[in-house]
């Protein structure tokens, strides 16, 4: 029911027509009108026509696709490539109710008729209008059925980057295709830090004079990498003129876009003289995988073209394959369209009809109502054709864009590799890489034979002023002439910087013609900033010397890699520490001395206590004992104590103490040694911070960038800065000091300072380098020589030559290694308290054990005493008991033992007397 109303409504609504067999209850018509808009009256057009016709025959005879519906082809010759005529031709086609148009051939036509296609909703399928700016956003009904030029330009950009070239020249036809293609190339090159240095547009049909004019301009440019983006008609003519101008010789690189492979493939072989003109050219071809389908089509191709042209079978270009697949793509899309139950209807109810009444009969044009559906059917096709897999990505480009890169050699071409969007440059076919993850790190190509029959990769640029020697500015230094100086009265320059430059230039694979031009008046050091500025002004082509790379200067010129590190440092005078009579006290802090002395006394006392009862050495009158304690304890300092220790505890304490003494002794010796040899700063300046905060005057090398740095970056007042020219002047100013008209410190780059200090031991660098600069050679912006010299300098650094040149000129002598240490901290208690703790604990423990022993002995002794003399008078009070204890302690152990032995004997004899025997008692 709904269907019925729908159909009814459609019939009623104004101007609905179906194509083919007229009204029917089936939606599938007998035939579908397809327009083809191509220039068939050219060699390539004829070839494409064969491919298209073959495809249409194949589709129409294949029952599996579109059933009994036939593709009805309406051919329209797009004879002129011209905008307006093409529009008229397109309109003619569209008036015939085509559902889709295959074409147009040229990008220019595509741009203009895409607007018409948008309005009438008729999809345009073009395999030759590959301009990247025909975007699916602006022109949704334009569908590119071959590879977008964007990818070809990406491939060229990657090729340029692969060979390490930086700048290219683009020669192109100044039309939509040329301009837009080259714009895309520029974008892709800049993504790879390369650029188009010169664009040389040509009119669409240039005369020989025009080509000559353009090429002469190209030859004058610096770059030798030429990208040629033109068409099959004018390409050979440009090459021919270039050959005549000698631009197909050694040093040049020509990269031609796919027009050249099309030409070579269709007209193969080219006439020998044309072939001669393009020897060594690198060009690209749309890559199609080698499949069975493709092989079959290629073998069919000879049959298709045989006998139809006077000049025999025609070559097969990649465009033929894409043309063949375009028809199939469209057929499959229409098939899907019908399978989805869609009908083909047209309406003239549009803005066009508002124009009716005039004589143009624009109202004959119809809008294809289901154009949008057919468009999405086309974009949704997923098929395998002779070009491989045909499928669209979400941005309406064919999947897996890839190009072959070929090199014209002899009478043919040789493939040097592939480029694919997936994995960049490779020597294996891209389809073998699609399964692997993207990896652009191992880009590879086979060797190329460049113009001039050479396999040596061209450098890619020439010195701009063709043949003239480079004028290299050299600062005429007055001081530190080791870096760069002019031999008096000659034009010969020598020095560290000159040697580095010469060594680097020698590493370049090409010769550099140059002249050294002195800069400066010879009385004072020239300003290197001014020298750098003169490069921008065009006075010099380069500058070689002690030129520090600073931010300000890099804004003007390009520097090479630094060949010497040279940060700013502060230099101050030093004086040898005066040897005072009390220098020997310096190693230890007073506290350390005090604690050490106390420990000597304590250990002496402890040993005395432990030894007193056993050892005769520690006995005697009190006066003698005090002397013994002192003598004993201090003589341990030299391990020279004579008194023998006999008690275990005493030996334990002494052992630990001797260990402590050993360590203190050696620390003292080491510290004293360094204190006596170390120098001392004459000023309180310890580095850049203390210098900035002080009010002292500061010296700097006249003509150096240091002045600006100190004023602008560190905010030092200008009045504090004193320019100094020669090392002698600097030394004198430093000696005088800030208060006597000299300077307190001198700030300069490490490279100069090393030279300065090499022969002057009474100055030293304080603090760290506070900037990290380096010296480089200066070149005009974007100079390719700067890049090559950078590489050469790195090479010099890696193979050790840079160091050898450095040592030759700037070998640092005597004083530099010294003076690194400026102050030695005294040793304080902190470093030793662990030792003292151990020693103290040992003493304490020994005393404690000793006390317990003696208490036990005393107790035993006391009870014996009580036993032996139990008289009540002897019943001791507390004080007398202490007294007895004290005397007990003071007694020699031997005596105590003897006494108690005696007492025992007495007791025994007493008992035996009781028993009646009268033995004598002695
Ligand atoms: C349409 O109908 C006619 C008869 O009215 C018939 O001959 C023809 O085959 C039909 N076409 C289709 C596509 O069904
Ligand atoms: C419509 O199609 C059916 C078969 O699908 C057929 O029987 C019928 O005759 C057709 N009607 C017309 C008007 O062609
Ligand atoms: C094809 O081009 C030639 C000149 O190039 C011209 O003489 C001829 O008439 C053209 N043929 C057609 C069919 O346009
Ligand atoms: C080419 O044509 C010949 C006869 O004209 C035929 O025998 C042969 O099979 C054809 N080859 C192909 C690939 O179509
Ligand atoms: C040769 O071309 C003509 C049209 O130019 C065409 O009619 C004919 O079929 C072609 N012959 C072959 C063998 O393709
Ligand atoms: C639509 O086109 C037909 C013929 O092509 C014409 O008769 C009719 O008037 C047109 N309708 C409008 C609204 O222009
Ligand atoms: C396209 O078809 C191939 C097989 O012909 C299939 O492997 C692939 O998944 C399909 N892709 C999409 C997006 O449907």
Image (cartoon, helix red, strand yellow):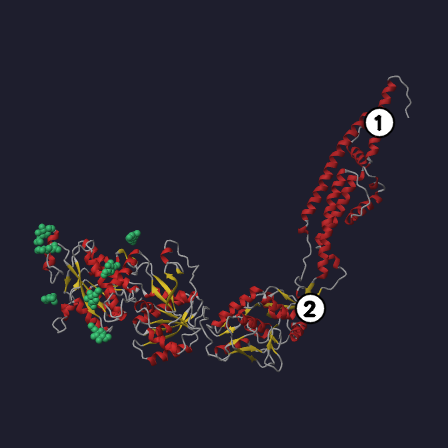
- The image quarter containing residue 419 is bottom left
Q: Residue at x 29, y 77 (%)?
A: 205
- In the image, 875 versus 311, the foreground residue is 311
Give the left or right position of residue 687, taking residue 397 as reference. right
- Helix, strand or loop at mark 1: helix
- Which one is in front in this view, the residue at disc 2 or the one at disc 1? 2
Residue 417 at x, y percent in the picture:
39, 62
Q: Quadrant of the C terminus?
A: top right
> On screen, 155 above or below 249?
above
Q: Mark 2 points at which residue?
A: 762
Residue 614 at x, y percent in the picture:
81, 37
Compute the Cα span from label 2 to label 1: 83 Å
Please say if the residues under marks 2 and 1 sit with CB atoms less than 8 Å apart.
Answer: no
Label 2 or label 1, whichever comes before in sequence order: 2
> On screen, 697 above or below 378?
below
- Helix, strand or loop at mark 2: loop
| Other-residue count near label 1 (Cα within 10 Å), few / some / many at <14 / 14–19 / ≥20 | some
Q: Name the residue under label 1.
A: 903
- The image quarter containing residue 618 is top right
> On screen, 78 above or below 610?
below
Q: Which residue is drawn at 44% across and 75% down?
A: 222
Count the marks: how many? 2
- In the image, 550 versus 514, the foreground residue is 514
- Which quarter holds ligand 4? bottom left
Give the left or right position of residue 624, taking residue 379 as reference. right
Residue 344 at x, y percent in the picture:
16, 59
């Amino acid at each position: 029911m709904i269907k019925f109303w729908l159909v009814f409504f459609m019939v009623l609504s104004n101007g609905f027509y179906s194509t083919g067999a007229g009204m029917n209850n089936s939606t599938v018509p007998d035939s579908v009108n397809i327009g083809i808009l191509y220039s068939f009256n050219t060699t390539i057009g004829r070839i494409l026509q064969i491919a298209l016709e073959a495809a249409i025959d194949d589709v129409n005879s294949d029952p599996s696709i579109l059933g009994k519906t036939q593709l009805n082809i309406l051919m329209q010759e797009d004879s002129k490539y011209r905008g307006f005529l093409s529009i008229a031709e397109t309109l003619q086609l569209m008036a015939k109710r085509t559902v889709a148009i295959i074409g147009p051939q040229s990008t220019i036509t595509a741009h203009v008729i895409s607007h018409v296609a948008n309005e009438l909703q008729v999809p345009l399928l073009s395999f030759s209008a590959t301009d990247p700016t025909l975007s699916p956003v602006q022109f949704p009904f334009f569908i590119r059925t071959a590879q977008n030029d964007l990818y070809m330009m990406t491939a060229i950009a990657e090729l340029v980057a692969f060979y390490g070239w930086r700048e290219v020249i683009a020669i192109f036809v100044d039309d939509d295709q040329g301009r837009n293609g080259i714009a895309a190339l520029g974008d892709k090159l800049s993504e790879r830090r390369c650029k188009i240095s010169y664009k040389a547009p040509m009119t669409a049909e240039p005369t020989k004079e025009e080509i000559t004019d353009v090429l002469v301009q190209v030859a004058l440019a610096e770059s030798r990498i030429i990208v040629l983006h033109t068409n099959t008609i004018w390409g050979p003519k440009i090459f021919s003129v270039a050959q005549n101008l000698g631009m197909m010789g050694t040093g040049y690189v020509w990269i031609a876009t796919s027009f050249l492979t099309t030409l070579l493939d269709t007209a193969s072989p080219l006439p020998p003289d044309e072939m001669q003109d393009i020897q060594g050219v690198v060009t690209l071809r749309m890559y199609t995988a080698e499949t069975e389908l493709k092989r079959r089509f290629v073998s069919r191709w000879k049959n298709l073209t045989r006998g139809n042209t006077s000049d025999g079978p025609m070559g097969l270009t990649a465009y033929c394959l894409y043309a063949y697949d375009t028809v199939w793509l469209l057929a499959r899309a229409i098939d899907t369209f019908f399978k989805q139950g869609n009908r083909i209807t047209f309406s003239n109810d549009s803005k066009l009809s508002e124009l009716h009444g005039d004589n143009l009969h624009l109202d004959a044009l119809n809008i294809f109502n289901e154009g949008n559906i057919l468009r999405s059917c086309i974009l949704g096709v997923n098929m395998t054709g002779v070009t491989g897999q045909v499928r669209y990505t979400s941005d309406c480009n064919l999947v897996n864009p890839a190009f072959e890169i070929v090199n014209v050699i002899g009478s043919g071409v040789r493939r040097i590799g592939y480029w694919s969007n997936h994995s960049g440059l490779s020597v294996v076919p891209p389809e073998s890489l699609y399964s692997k993850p993207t990896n652009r790190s191992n880009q590879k190509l086979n060797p190329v034979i460049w113009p001039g029959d050479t396999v040596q990769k061209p450098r890619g640029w020439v010195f701009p002023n063709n043949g003239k020697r480079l004028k290299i500015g050299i600062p005429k230094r007055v001081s530190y002439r080791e870096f760069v100086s002019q031999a008096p009265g000659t034009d010969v320059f020598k020095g560290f910087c000159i040697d580095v430059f010469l060594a680097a230039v020698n590493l370049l694979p090409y010769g550099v013609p140059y002249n050294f031009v002195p800069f400066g008046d010879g009385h004072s050091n020239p300003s290197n900033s001014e020298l750098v500025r003169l490069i921008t002004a065009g006075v010099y082509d380069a500058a070689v010397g002690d030129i520090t790379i600073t931010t300000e200067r890099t804004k003007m010129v390009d520097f090479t890699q630094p060949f010497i590190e040279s940060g700013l440092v502060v230099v101050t005078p030093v004086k040898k520490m005066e040897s005072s009579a009390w220098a020997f006290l310096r190693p230890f802090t007073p506290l350390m001395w005090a604690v050490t002395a106390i420990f000597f006394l304590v250990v002496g006392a402890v040993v005395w206590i432990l030894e007193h009862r056993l050892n005769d050495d520690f006995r005697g009158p009190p006066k003698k004992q005090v002397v013994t304690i002192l003598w004993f304890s201090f003589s341990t300092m030299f391990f020279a104590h004579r008194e023998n220790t006999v008690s275990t505890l005493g030996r334990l304490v002494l052992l630990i103490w001797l260990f402590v003494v050993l360590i203190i002794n050696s620390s003292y010796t080491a510290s004293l040694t360094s204190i006596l040899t170390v120098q001392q700063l004459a000023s309180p300046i310890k580095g850049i911070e203390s210098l900035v905060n002080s009010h002292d005057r500061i010296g700097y090398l006249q003509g150096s960038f240091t002045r600006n740095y100190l004023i602008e970056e560190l905010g030092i007042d200008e009045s504090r800065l004193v320019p100094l020219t020669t090392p002698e002047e600097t030394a004198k100013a430093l000696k005088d000091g800030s208060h006597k008209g000299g300077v307190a410190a001198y700030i300069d780059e490490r490279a100069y300072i090393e030279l300065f200090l090499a022969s002057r031991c009474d100055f030293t660098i304080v603090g760290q380098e506070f900037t990290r600069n380096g010296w480089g050679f200066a070149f005009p912006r974007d100079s390719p020589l700067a890049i090559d010299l950078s590489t050469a300098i790195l090479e010099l650094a890696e193979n050790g030559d840079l160091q050898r040149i450095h040592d030759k000129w700037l070998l640092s002598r005597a004083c530099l290694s010294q003076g690194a240490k400026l102050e030695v901290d005294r040793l304080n208690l902190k470093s030793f308290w662990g030792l003292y703790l151990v020693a103290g604990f040992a003493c304490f423990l020994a005393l404690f054990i000793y006390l317990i022993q003696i208490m036990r002995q005393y107790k035993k002794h006391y009870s014996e005493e009580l036993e032996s003399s139990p008289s009540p008078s002897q019943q001791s009070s507390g004080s007398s008991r202490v007294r007895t204890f004290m005397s007990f302690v003071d007694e020699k152990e031997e005596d105590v033992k003897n006494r108690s032995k005696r007492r025992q004997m007495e007791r025994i004899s007493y008992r035996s007397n009781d028993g009646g025997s009268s033995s004598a008692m002695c």
